């Protein structure tokens, strides 16, 4: 049996944990640089605030209905997610963290378990311990668990946030209710094609032949079909080493000065290096990209990227920063207002499989130095130790005018109780 646990309106719920006065009131969370809506409470949805809405276009609506607006607080959301996921591991050892607010659980030899009772226990434990409300869907396969979770969330008043697909009748009824474009794993392109063929529900999709599905949607689509039919095909996935690691950001404002953009690119490359070291990997190439604001049609437009092949595998912050700046120098042009840049490290290999080169290799002193820097940053606070090429005061330069405190990760921002 599989279960999908989903945190309800996660970002908005995280803000409410520390602001109980906002319970049952509309809340929205904005993307980087306070650009657009990326999370909404149910109350905000009822007021007609769409996902992805540009904040400036809905300013009057937000003010008219006194909607609480927050900038993205990823430090808080990441920590709250870790707390939820750690609690879930106490209910089964087989868990796949699918996203920041979702996790699949797998239960083996579970004939003795009453899943209604067990689901309620999971729900009570997570909500009581973290304040985050969750919905749970149980089913014989991962794809059906996703469907069951959707039903649990859609009809929360009826099922109290827990729904189980445990009979053939329930499976068929659920698939007939679910639109094909809402099926987990069916993208917009496939949904559009299926709708043109008159296939509008998940059930109709499962009625197509295996040969047709494999021909038009590859073996991935066929696995999904079998999973929806109740045949366990998709299993819990283990954490895999990433093939590419990216750090990209929109700037808080337009920049035309090379030195300011160089500092940003250096910071992005150092972030990638830290992630490489965390998974004990090196990279052998990196891409640097830079572009202007495509929404500013009144300004000249320019976008460019370049791939730098490193002469040796490395995860050193100093070396990757140097390579990234070399790339930036080759693509930067004066006369443009730049809004976004990024660094992507590629051709990733295990750190322990490094091949020594004849003429040029990574500086061996960097390994112990980077280990010391990572340990210090972990002990005394993230980003306390930086390279001279970085801004010592800020790591990410974004407009965050409505940022809430980092209640759980920053000592000087914890809640103060007056007695």
Image (cartoon, helix red, strand yellow):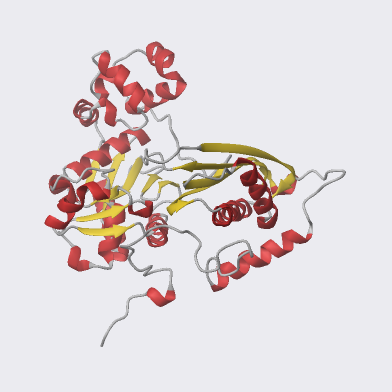
Residue 257 is left or right of residue 85, and the answer is: right
The one nearer the camera, 170 or 276, is: 276
Residue 51 is left or right of residue 338, and the answer is: left
Which quadrant would residue 171 be assigned to in this image?
Answer: top left
Q: Which residue is drawn at 41% across and 51% down?
A: 92
Q: Where is residue 60 in the image (x, y as percent from the top left)?
A: 16, 52
The answer to whether residue 241 of the structure is visible from this angle is: no
Q: Position of residue 404 (x, y in %)?
A: 32, 66
The one nearer the camera, 417 or 245, is: 245
The answer to whether residue 337 of the structure is visible from this angle is: yes
Q: Where is residue 266 in the image (x, y as percent from the top left)?
A: 60, 54
Which quadrant would residue 12 be assigned to in this image?
Answer: bottom left
Q: Residue furthest bottom?
A: 419
The one nearer the camera, 231 or 130, is: 130
Quarter of the image for the N terminus: give it.
top left
Quarter of the image for the C terminus: give it.
bottom left
Residue 245 is left or right of residue 130, and the answer is: right
Position of 254 relative to 243 (above/below): below
Q: Residue at x 32, y 25 (%)?
A: 229
Q: Which residue is drawn at 39% across and 14% down?
A: 210
Residue 116 is left or right of residue 272, and the answer is: left
Q: Where is residue 163 in the image (x, y as percent from the top left)?
A: 23, 42
């Amino acid at each position: 049996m599989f279960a999908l646990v989903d945190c309800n309106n996660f970002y908005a719920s995280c803000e409410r944990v520390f602001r109980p006065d906002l319970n049952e009131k509309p809340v929205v969370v904005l993307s980087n640089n306070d650009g657009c809506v990326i999370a909404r409470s149910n109350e905000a949805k009822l007021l007609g605030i769409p996902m992805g809405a540009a904040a400036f276009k809905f300013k009057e609506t937000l003010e008219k209905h006194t909607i609480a607006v927050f900038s993205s607080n990823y430090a808080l959301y990441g920590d709250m997610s870790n707390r939820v996921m750690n609690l879930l591991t106490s209910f089964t050892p087989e868990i796949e963290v699918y996203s920041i607010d979702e996790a699949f659980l797998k239960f083996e030899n579970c004939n003795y378990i009453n899943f209604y009772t067990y689901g309620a226990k999971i729900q009570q434990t997570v909500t009581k311990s973290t304040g985050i409300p969750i919905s749970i869907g149980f089913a014989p396969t991962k794809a059906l668990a996703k469907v069951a979770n959707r039903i649990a969330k859609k009809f929360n008043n009826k099922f109290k946030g827990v729904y189980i697909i445990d009979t053939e009748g329930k499976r068929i009824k659920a698939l007939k209710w679910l639109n094909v474009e809402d099926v987990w794993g069916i993208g917009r392109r496939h949904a559009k094609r299926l709708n043109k063929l008159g296939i509008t529900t998940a059930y109709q999709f499962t009625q197509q032949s295996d040969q047709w599905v494999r021909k038009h949607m590859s073996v991935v689509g066929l696995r999904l079909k079998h999973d929806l039919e109740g045949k366990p095909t998709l299993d819990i996935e283990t954490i895999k080493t990433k093939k590419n690691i990216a750090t990209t950001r929109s700037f808080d404002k337009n920049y035309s000065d090379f030195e300011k953009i160089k500092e940003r690119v250096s910071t992005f490359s150092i972030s990638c290096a830290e992630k490489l070291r965390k998974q004990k990997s090196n990279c052998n190439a990196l891409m640097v990209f830079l572009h202007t604001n495509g929404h500013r049609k009144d300004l000249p437009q320019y976008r460019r990227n370049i791939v730098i092949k490193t002469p040796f595998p490395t995860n050193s912050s100093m070396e990757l920063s140097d390579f990234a700046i070399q790339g930036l120098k080759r693509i930067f042009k004066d006369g443009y207002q730049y809004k976004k840049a990024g660094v992507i490290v590629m051709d990733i290999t295990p750190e322990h499989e490094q091949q020594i080169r004849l003429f040029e290799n990574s500086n061996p002193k960097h390994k112990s130095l980077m280990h010391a820097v990572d340990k210090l940053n972990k002990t005394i606070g993230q980003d306390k130790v930086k390279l001279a090429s970085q801004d010592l005061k800020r790591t990410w330069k974004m407009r965050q005018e409505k940022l809430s405190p980092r209640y759980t990760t920053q000592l000087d921002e914890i809640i103060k109780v007056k007695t």
